[in-house]
Image (tube, rainbow, N blue to C red):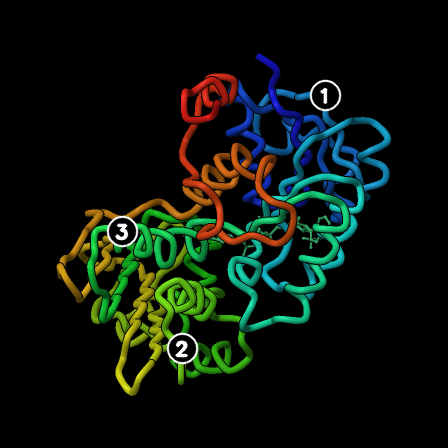
Amino acid sequence: MHPIPILQIGMGPLGQRITRFLRERRALRLVGAVDIDPDKTGTDAGTRAGGPPLDVSIAGTLTEALATCEPQVALVTTVSSIRSVAPQIEAVVAQGLPVVSTCEELSYPWDAAPAAARAIDRAARAHGVAVLGTGVNPGFLMDLLPLCLTAVCQRVDRIEVERIQDAATRRGPFQKKIGAGLDLETFDQRKRAGTLRHVGLTESMQMIAHRMGWSLEKTSDVIAPVVATQRIETDALTIEPGQAAGVEQIGTATCGGRACIRLVFRAAVGEPDPHDSVSVEGVPSFRSVIPGGIHGDIATCAITLNAVGQIRTAAPGLRTMADLPPVSFFADLDAQAAAPDAQ
Ligand SMILES: NC(=O)c1ccc[n+]([C@@H]2O[C@H](COP(=O)([O-])OP(=O)(O)OC[C@H]3O[C@@H](n4cnc5c(N)ncnc54)[C@H](OP(=O)(O)O)[C@@H]3O)[C@@H](O)[C@H]2O)c1
């Protein structure tokens, strides 16, 4: 058993959780880490992630990190914008390393940012490696999962996905990120400034449409506050009646003059009935529900690690979750490679 050596780029909350998860994975091993935050550089990645030292010092640059380790895959958890992540990824693939990133706009950038997507694709092909954008959402719950569920359909007319989260169980920074505790005027200002937005609904709609063969005429992405009707207290903040308890964002897409995709993302403190659901209208029509919903940070870190199993053998270029063979949990890559269908 030879664990795959991993380079972690970005040691924020996600990079730290991935570092903790890596300790528990037999098939993967952290060998290097990079972050531009001077408070983090020079510290041990294991300690930074809240555990015992791992003897992996966080480097300030990719070059510094690669002077001390020989990774086979890089995980990039730094930014949400494809234009910002593009130079980071191009530098990594130039070293011959495949990339799995949680950058939301990278999950399906072919329609929203075609020039950046083509540049990343060209760089990856030139160096013979694959690049993937993934995560819980975008990357799975509101795009790949509904696509997989249509495997049983003879016809698909419309797809609706709901991701409803009770933010009471999430970290204080997440509660603040979704606008909980803001008066409605401040909520509106943040919304107009673009700082109160779940990134990725449009990319999810475009990934679904591409696979369904739907040519989208119009997409919309509308953000509104979820307003508290009573006083709510969490460990991090107090929300008065009339203030925002969180955010609702609804993405809709039309094709052939009809609404074909509706994605409802709602995250609010005290939200009743949290769940993830997929409704498919077609032949057959059905609804699939995950009661309680999936924990976003756990899922994003796990799917990033699970995608390592596929990214090393994927065709060179920029790939999406819909392009790869199914990504699943794996305990042991040697066992996966020895499976009869892999011969
Ligand atoms: N697809 C999904 O489902 C999904 C789910 C959750 C999160 N995400 C995304 O994943 C990303 C990571 O999440 P997070 O909560 O850990 O974000 P975060 O709190 O912003 O942390 C990112 C870390 O990366 C560092 N960084 C920024 N640019 C860098 C660079 N060029 N090289 C090395 N390090 C760099 C940052 O340093 P500074 O603080 O100094 O900038 C920070 O320490 C975010 O963009 C988030 O939106 C995606």
| Disc 3 to disc 2, C-alpha distance | 20 Å
Name the residue that disc number 2 marks: 215
Q: Position of residue 103 (x, y in %)?
A: 57, 55
Q: Position of residue 102 (x, y in %)?
A: 55, 50
Left or right of 74 on screen, residue 239:
left
Left or right of 222 on screen, residue 130:
right
Residue density around tag 1, few if under 14, some if 14–19, many if 20 or more, within 10 Å: some
Left or right of 282 on screen, residue 30:
right
Residue density around tag 3, few if under 14, some if 14–19, many if 20 or more, within 10 Å: few
Name the residue that disc number 1 marks: 55
Which element carries disc 2, helix, strand or loop?
loop
Q: Quadrant of residue 331?
A: top left
Residue depth check, mark 2 versus mark 1: number of the one nearer the observer:
2
- Between 9 and 282, the one lying in front of the other is 282
Residue density around tag 2, few if under 14, some if 14–19, many if 20 or more, within 10 Å: few
Going 29% across and 54% down the picture, which residue do you hit?
166
Q: Amino acid at mark 3?
A: Ala
Q: Amino acid at mark 2?
A: Ser
Mark before the other along the chain sequence, 3 or 1: 1
**Residue 259 seen in render:** yes
